Amino acid sequence: MIDKTKLMLVLLVVIVTVITCIHPIYPNEQTLQHIGTVLLLIPLTMDVFRKQLPMSAFIGIVGFTLLHVIGARYIYSYVPYKEWAVSLGLVEKGFFHDPRNHYDRLVHFSFGALLFPYFVYLCRKWVKHQSFVAVVMAWMMIQTGSLIYELFEWLLTIVMTAEEADYYNGQQGDMWDAQKDMALALFGSTGMFLVYAVRSLVRRGK
């Protein structure tokens, strides 16, 4: 039997991905971005049948994938979230003073926060730790994954033209972009680390 709730969430991701691929604005760059989408869909699709992932981990991957899919359409640097916020009446026109597009910052923070439950699940499964040690290992894996991704972006600058690399990396002229991205992943994962730590202490106190 399949998990119908998880199946609906996977279908949601697929539908949103297909919609965002209609009349692509940056076809080549968007295709490259969707390598990550495929990698994220693999554990989701498998778990629809295996039903092993905790719902918190599953929803976290779904949420992160949706953020990534939206970012992929606009290659992150051009996600019109400011225009969306104004048109929905959430903020007044002129609310956003910083000309930089910060959508990529949100996704890097979400990498640390939303994928944290999944990494905790992996640590508890692979190393057979059901204790706080798995949470610490998950926190370390987030930092390592963030570092590896930034190294991957750096390698792209070597094999691609400067314009193509800038499109994909989304540095937007910020020489400290990689460091800030890793810091945001650190903040997101540390926030989740504290949530797990407090929950662990509460359980011990009972």
Image (cartoon, rainbow, N blue to C red):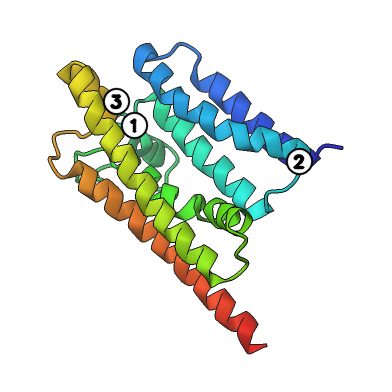
Residue 171 position by quadrant: top left
Front disc: 1 or 2: 2
Left/right placement of residue 53 relative to residue 96 reads right
Q: Is 183 displayed left or right of 74 in the figure?
A: left
Q: Position of residue 164 (x, y in %)?
A: 23, 18
Q: Amino acid at mark 3?
A: Tyr
Q: Which residue is mark 1?
A: 76
Q: Secondary structure at mark 3?
A: helix
Q: Are marks 1 and 2 in contact (CB under 8 Å)?
A: no
CA gap, disc 1 to disc 2? 33 Å
Q: Residues within 10 Å of mark 2 (few under 14, many from 20)?
A: few
**Mark 3 or mark 1, which is nearer the start of the sequence?**
1
Report which residue position mark 3 lands on.
Answer: 168
* Label 1: element kind: loop
Q: Nearer the viewer, residue 49 or 174?
A: 49
The residue beneath circle 2 is 50
Q: Residue at x 39, y 43 (%)?
A: 107
| Viewer-closest of 16 and 32 | 32
Q: Position of residue 1 (x, y in %)?
A: 87, 37
Q: Nearer the viewer, mark 3 or mark 2?
A: 2
Labels 1, 3: front one? 3
- Left or right of 173: which side holds 198? right
Label 3 neighbour load within 10 Å: few <14, some 14-19, many 20+: many
